[in-house]
Image (cartoon, rainbow, N blue to C red):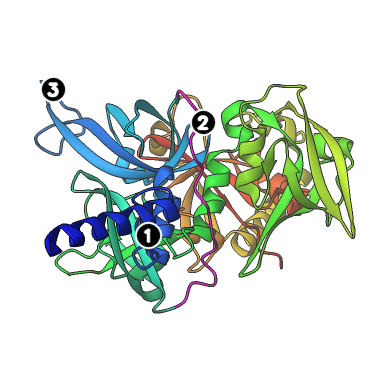
Amino acid sequence: MTKRISIIALLALSLVCVARHGSWAASENRTTPLVKAVTRVNPSVVNIHSEKTSYNGESLFQSGRGRKVSGMGTGIVVDERGYIVTNYHVVQGVDSLRATMNDGGTYSAQVISYDRVHDLAVVKVNPSQPLTVAHFGVSMDVMLGETVFAVGNAFGYEHTLTKGVVSALSRDVEVNEKQAYKNLIQTDASINPGNSGGPLCNLDGEVIGINVAIRAGAQRIGFAIPIDDARKIIARLLSIEELNSLNHGVIVRDIKTADRQELIVEGTQPSGPGNTAGLLKGDIFVKAGSIMVADSADLERALLGRTVGETVTVEVRRGAETKTLELTLAKSTTPRVAATPTAAAMQPPVTTQTVTSRRTQDESAADKAWKALGIRLAPLAPRERQLVSPRYRGGMRVSEIRRGSPAVMNGMQIGDILVGLHVWETLNSDNISYVMDHPQLSTFSPLKFYIVRKGETLFGHMPIVEN
């Protein structure tokens, strides 16, 4: 009889729990801040599986059949239409990519842009429904000893969670002679093969870093790219100028502090869309289309996929007021590496006087390039011209780079062949002078550059140091 009463009492207690919680819910003691944070970030984590062909030997030119090799990595959803950020080394040289979402949905993926130097890439899937965009925090206020966690495709075990703390900040890590990283977050949350490209998160479920590397032979020493640094690169990888050949004509600057994430208008291109829309220096973006804007990556993705002449409603904060403006996108006038003005167009007729002037101009160009960019350039020798892709008319060889300069911090190397700056080709010192003496040089910052390295065209951006 006693046993029967006990069973009835247990059932009654269970029914009370169901009545209170609506289901067989976990207790509040079990639903810890970590559980809540993981629940928040998980829908935005993507497991990436790749396949590439591997050949025996190190020869540049391969013959015969190679063998198929499977790879794995992780990605983070940055736009609901299927744009996902991951590490470049996850997708480098792959034949095919497959992305698996938290709900089990699987899609083919394509690499649409990448930055080899900073080891980031954006891949695109075509989802059947909008994806969940990750909540991005800031990394500038990350604290030593702060609890963090990583989610990723560790050793192919999808959505694996590992927890730890921030072990160190501002680590510089050299992986090999070709890859080095600056300013990484070090953590003892286990980072395993397959975690690359995935999120390092805080207990608010915000992404504060992108996992990128582990220390071989060590235990619980992993590294992540701070999200403040990564978001700047993501903005370039989502650039509507690069992906859609569109121009918004707005020069912006990211402001990120512990309690402030804002995108400020620094200026507009003359007669460009931003100028025509009425944007003014000091305006703070609030919204573009349907997307709330916290930084330049948000602005680019808000305008991504649109067409020439399409008008986007933008909201900005101007002083104490909120202004609603109409931004009409224009076709980009920036060719991949522009041939205007050509070297011939910039050179006056050859006379004794112009030769003397050109020598002075060469010295000025060299000094300005060294001070502002941190590079010295040399003309290509006849035997070096074959190193330049047929699509370019020539270039200048990087002969020296100043330590700590914008050039070295943004991946330029001695021996690279500079084929373009901003929208102009760089065939000789006259071309360099044209760019360095341009009256609107300050508005070009960060200055876009194009280089050829081992037959491959690469591009990047570097800030111009004011002197």
Residue interval drawn in magenta: 128-143
The residue positioned 37% from the left and 57% from the top of the image is 17
From the top left corner, tell me how far across and down residue 262 is, in percent. 70, 58
Nearest to the observer: residue 248 or residue 22: 22
Q: Which mark is residue 35?
A: 1
Q: Nearer the viewer, mark 1 or mark 2?
A: 1
Side (left or right) of 237 relative to 194: right
Residue 285 on the magenta span: no
Which dot, 3 or 2, sits closer to the camera? 2
- Separation of marks 1 and 3 at Cα, in angstroms: 52 Å
For label 3, count other residues whose C-alpha is less than 10 Å away and answer few (under 14), some (14-19) or many (20+). few
Q: Residue at x 20, y 60 (%)?
A: 5
Residue under pointer 2 = 130
**Residue drawn where x is 12% and y is 26% of the image:** 66
Which mark is first along the chain, 3 or 1? 1
The image quadrant of residue 465 is bottom right
**439 on left or right of 23:** right
Type of amino acid under label 1: Val
Q: Which mark is residue 63?
A: 3
Q: Position of residue 234 (x, y in %)?
A: 52, 46
The verdict on residue 136 being magenta is: yes
- The vertical placement of 17 against 186, above or below, is above
Q: Position of residue 167 (x, y in %)?
A: 34, 76
The quarter of the picture where the N terminus appears is: bottom left
